[in-house]
Amino acid sequence: MGGILQVRVSAWTFDEKEVSKRWPSLASLVWEDGTFITPARGVMELAEAVQTACHAELIDKKKVEALEDKAKTAHDTLQKLRASLADWQPQEADKLTYALEDNLDALEDIAAKF
């Protein structure tokens, strides 16, 4: 890396509309009611929003109880993804993107029952 120009390994959601299509119940739960406001609504932001909504009890307590274990797992996966990106480990980050999406699939299954 240069003194001014830095190289980063990063991950982002290409099309945020796809997030609401794949995880509609979960996205609605944390974003559509206006409780949790964020400028970006990508995959990583959804995992963060679900964890925050559970931890801060921004959603109904019974919903928190149903989601909190899987939300923690998703958040832990997100943290590992961020760490692998920071450590310039793109192959590990790639594996973790699939794991994070699987975590969100599991959370969607729960949220769809509300």
Image: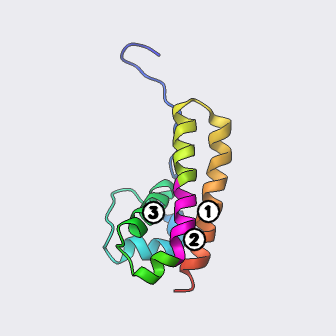
Q: From the viewer's perspective, is 50 left or right of 69?
A: left
Q: Is residue 99 above or below residue 114?
A: above
For mark 3, give the secondary structure: helix
Front residue of 73 and 103: 73
Residue extending farthest to the top is 3
- How far apart marks 3 and 1 lie (CA) works out to 12 Å
Residue linked to disc 2:
107
Instruction: Find residue 59 and name its label.
Output: none
Instruction: Find residue 51 and name its label.
Output: 3
Residue linked to disc 1:
103
Q: Residues within 10 Å of mark 3 (few under 14, many from 20)?
A: many
Residue for point 41% across, 80% down: 61
Q: Is residue 100 above or below residue 106?
A: above
Residue for point 43% across, 22% down: 6
Is the Cβ of the residue at disc 2 closer than 8 Å to that at disc 1? Answer: yes
Task: Indicate the colouring scheme.
Answer: rainbow
Q: From the viewer's perspective, is 95 left or right of 9?
A: right
Q: Residue 35 location in percent, x, y?
A: 31, 72
Mark 3 or 1, nearer chain start = 3
Front residue of 23 and 99: 99
Mark 2 or 3, nearer chain start = 3
**Could you tell me what secondary structure mostly forms the magenta stretch?**
helix
Q: Number of numbered discs present?
A: 3
Amino acid, disc 2: Leu
User: Per the image, is 68 magenta?
Assistant: yes
Highlighted range, magenta: 66-75
